[in-house]
């Protein structure tokens, strides 16, 4: 299922007109005192692989481990693309997958920053305007937020209870013992030079009660939701 | 050592003025009937990690799994960036690493295509022209070719004896039992619309005698060479 | 207060270091059977002028009457810029206002489409990264949504009850007698080739009870909110 | 006739294959001690509306109030786009009007700076090369200069007798009582860093005898000329 | 004096702070039945060399033999750059000359098309905005037109009496015996898809009385004018 | 045969579907103490003309006298384009030649720098991907290196024995009496800020035994090779 593990011939045979290709988009970004910089890479890659295991005819493209960052850009360890590079990357990969025969593509982004999402969306839009392809794009974080237990979380956000729990399920070895509490600081509609002023604690939420069990529940919910969407939303 | 496994604070402490950051550049590219599409990803990532294990003060950035391809572009499974996207990617990542304090950066590209190498080189040049940073850039394939046993290989090239053996050492589970023989077909100085005409067999070389032992010897040679270069060539 | 009505000398004297310049961003976009294509132009221009009348030291720049549109792009009368042109426009105007001495700039966009907002935001970010200026950017629609009566509106959106009422207050001569009811149609996370599939009725909401009184209340709320923000959020 | 005052349905019905769409291009530019910064906006907008009133089947698109400026760029109140942004703007708007069914488009620019005119021309050329559309582009100033009384004006130019009189006809409330005299200062073929060295007096010409009557005569001449051109030059 | 004939050391010694570097811009463009495609290359190169011979401290850079063409683009033998390539070319060459120490640069363009001139001008402007350099830019054709005998020529233009005579002086071997008569055909303000409709005869003017004597008089006038401008207009 | 010496009508008749157009690419680059800055211009132009004289149906386009330079960029007299300008130049010229009917194009570059070659190659590739044209691209230096006497030269390179001898054959008047000896200094895989560190002597090789005879032999070899390639490699 992993494209990078297939030979050219295996890939050629596997890629049929109703194959779904999942492209996981990761990031290298500061995620509080307790989570690794690759948090947004591990999550969508894990989700993509779990979806592929449970469905027929799903291929997983190599995970892109860099994204675009605004508010965490100045924090140690954040490595950011520009908006335009990310948009170009998306267009190139989509065109190349389409040239390989892909008709159904799902892009799952671990990072959910507004500009990052917009850059990917713009790239997708330019492609669907011209090509005979169906593209589904979302952050797994968006789906997690739909879970009823997540809706009731107050002020949980970047590197918060939700992400901590999910990582405790996916890569517990990379989550250390600290359980920070932090607040997102609003700045009205000011366009900030240093977006990190929004994260005085480097994260947002109360991670005290994070647990692998909760993370597992959320991860299952995301996986099930995506399986359902792939089954129903493509035409 | 893996940046994606570190927290922001661990990264901040680890990144000192004499830290070397290695950025592995992979690719998703047809590699004959026997090697996986991620061959050019597995090789530099492995080399980078081995170098980091043997040296103090080396960090490994997440591996970029896509590159630029010309001659294999039309083969099943090749997923290619454009020249400009790759160049922009390199500039963005370098600027972001430099903003994080990096002064010594080593870029190791698994793929050694001429345009791919040129795109990365051009990106590096634009950065060194402006920034206080030292950058070393090469393909591990270039170093392998310097090994005396490789110099004597005739017409070995893409997905040939050298790459097959190295992969048998690194990821034997991903090398199947076929051992193809192929020839690079010259086209003089014609600029080809379909570069795959150069690889009528999809690869170049005679892989019959490929072995993990030979691959291991070459991989050790590459690792040792890079350790020596990092120790001696940075000022 | 209107920059276009001032002479160069009047402008030079009026522009001091604590002057606030408001740049209204309009649009030319299909707005249902009942509202004019310039709806998103009239609203922010009106708001900007009312704010300027009530405050000292506020200048209003000429209103840009074109924006970027995705979901209504294929509807008759929508005239759309591309993302990149809008972003460049914002950067150019900001740089020119800054060269004229502006230190505080408020951008009010009538149109609130995601990509449009992102393009303007990206333009602003590139400028604040480099220049000694404070920029506030929002859609007046965002502020209207904060009004308690708007929060309780169900499924009101593009050309809905809120916009209809505001236009009945601002330009009643341009609102005809039709009062459409429409629904925003979700498409999950599919990237649509034709975004107008989201607006089968060309608008979203129930405009039956729209009134100039309600519109006036919302417009006053927006104006007061902006006056308060200008007074408190700039440093 | 004003597109921004029409509903989507009114626009759809009004736009037929022989409809002429006029796009007025304004500017925000220093215009001497006596004329408003929006002088180049008021003129083409007025002309466009008068032409539309006198002809059948003419629509007027919203006026773009910003242009590209070189020689007045450093004067207080000039707000300038770059060449490339203006060219992109023109291409975007033309493509969008064409997608809306426009086959005949007239662009009238109030500002007549060489680079500004070139940017618009280049944008138009790229579109006519590809699209089935007829485009007419000029500055109303170019037509005014053809009037016999204008030909005999000596050294009248930016914010001079001609523009002052036209503004006294169009917006007398915005023309103050000063009547400056100024000279355009030649600099041979030097490419100036500060183009305002060409306008030591901020304008060129002798405005002493400016009058609304003369302005009205010129404005009528321009309007009549455009009506004639629309009637005869489109195929 | 020709930079391409100097060694690096000769160039280094010759380039002092008051050296004038002349950059001739040529073109490859249809020039009627009688003149060679390189007409606009031969003229400025000849002029540049003659100026350099008559002055101290003037260097002549290699002549660029391609320009931007609109109205003759579709005629056989016209080889055209795009606007943006020409502008980039100018910026690159200026930056490189400035890096070599040039403080005074004269650009002489044989081709005088509006867009071509604008592209070069825009390139120059971007450079003078940032760099400590003086740039003079013109077409030798502009200077020729100032000669009293040329002012009295009626409707002489592209490949007309003026250019024919100048070429008879400079490269008589490349002027054949035909002496065409042609008319520039106006198209009002229509933006033409095929600009060659302006030149139904492929040229404009009456070449019957062309002569090397007249050409020589014009060429002397141009050379003398440029020598005077270099002596007086640089600061 | 020289396109710049032909009239539009002569060009039109000469350009048939099996015509070969040669585009020589020169450079303005420091070439040691003994060779002129235009060395890389004189060589391919000479070769192109000699090929054209010996073959039927070959046209020679005007020589572009500027290229892209990295390692010699900081040496006096090097005038360099950027990578992107050179690539755009190539695309523009190719598109224009193709629009003129060219089906077979040979690009000969005097300069053989890696980035320069890559820029031209990338430009060519973009064109052959879309257009019905055959393009051959090489540096005459590449062919010279194939000559058996050149293969045996040790460490001969930029401005070395080979180039000196060729220039003594082509333009002996521009080769002075110095015969330098120089060494290319390796810097491993470091990306150098100042590439001239590779040429501490400004050139590479031992020019002591350079001779017009040897240069002539090499030039004949290059000419014969190109004639053979044009005859055999185009389809």
Image (spheres, coloured by chain):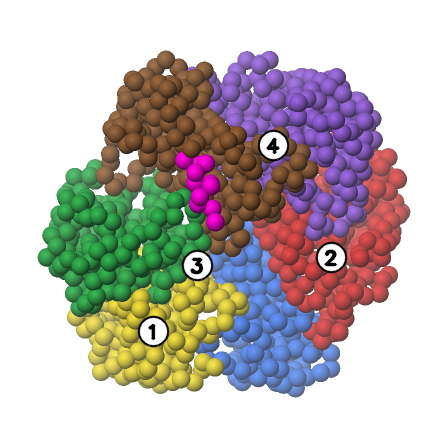
Chain colours: A green, B yellow, C brown, D purple, E red, F blue
- The residue carrying mark 1 is B13
Are the numbered discs 4 and 3 placed on the same chain, yes or no?
no
Are the numbered discs 3 and 1 placed on the same chain, yes or no?
yes
Rendered view: C78 above or below B233: above
Q: CA distance from mark 2 to mark 4?
A: 35 Å
**Which structural element holds mark 1?**
helix
Q: CA distance from mark 2 to mark 1?
A: 50 Å
Are the numbered discs 4 and 1 placed on the same chain, yes or no?
no
**Which structural element holds mark 2?**
strand
- The residue carrying mark 4 is C4
Q: CA distance from mark 3 to mark 1?
A: 28 Å
Asked if the residue at tag 1 contacts the one at tag 4, i.e. Cβ–Cβ closer than 8 Å, the answer is no
Quick check: can you spot residue E85? yes
Q: Position of residue B54 (x, y in %)?
A: 29, 83
Q: Which numbered disc, 4 or 3, marks the residue closer to the eye?
A: 4
Residue ID at (41%, 63%): B96
**What's drawn in magenta, residue-wise?**
C225-235
SS majority, magenta: helix
* Residue C233 drawn in magenta: yes
Q: Residues within 10 Å of mark 3 (few under 14, many from 20)?
A: many
Q: Which numbered disc, 2 or 4, marks the residue closer to the eye?
A: 4
Front in this rendered view, residue D227 or A169:
A169
Are the numbered discs 2 and 4 placed on the same chain, yes or no?
no
Residue ID at (60%, 32%): C4
Residue ID at (57%, 64%): F68
**Which structural element holds mark 4?**
helix
Indicate which disc residue E134 carries: 2
Rendered view: A80 above or below B101: above
């Amino acid at each position: 299922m992993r494209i990078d593990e297939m030979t050219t011939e295996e890939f050629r045979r596997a890629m049929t007109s109703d194959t779904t290709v999942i492209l996981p988009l990761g990031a290298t970004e500061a995620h509080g005192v307790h989570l690794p910089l690759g948090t947004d890479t591990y999550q969508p890659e894990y989700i993509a692989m779990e979806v592929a295991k449970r469905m027929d005819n799903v291929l997983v493209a190599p995970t892109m481990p860099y994204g675009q960052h605004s508010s965490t850009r100045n924090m140690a360890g954040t490595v950011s693309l520009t908006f335009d590079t990310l948009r170009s990357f998306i267009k190139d990969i989509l065109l190349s997958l389409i040239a390989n025969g892909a008709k159904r593509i799902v892009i799952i982004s671990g990072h959910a920053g507004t500009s990052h999402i917009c850059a990917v969306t713009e790239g997708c839009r330019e492609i669907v305007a011209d090509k005979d392809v169906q593209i589904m794009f979302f952050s797994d974080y968006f789906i997690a937020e739909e879970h009823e237990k997540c809706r009731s979380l107050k002020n949980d956000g970047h590197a918060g209870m939700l992400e901590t729990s999910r990582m405790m399920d996916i890569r517990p070895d990379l989550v250390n013992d600290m359980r920070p509490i932090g607040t997102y600081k609003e700045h009205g509609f000011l366009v900030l030079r240093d977006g990190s002023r929004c994260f005085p604690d480097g994260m947002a939420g109360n991670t005290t009660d994070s647990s692998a069990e909760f993370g597992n529940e959320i991860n299952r919910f995301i996986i099930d939701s995506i399986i359902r969407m792939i089954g129903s939303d493509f035409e």
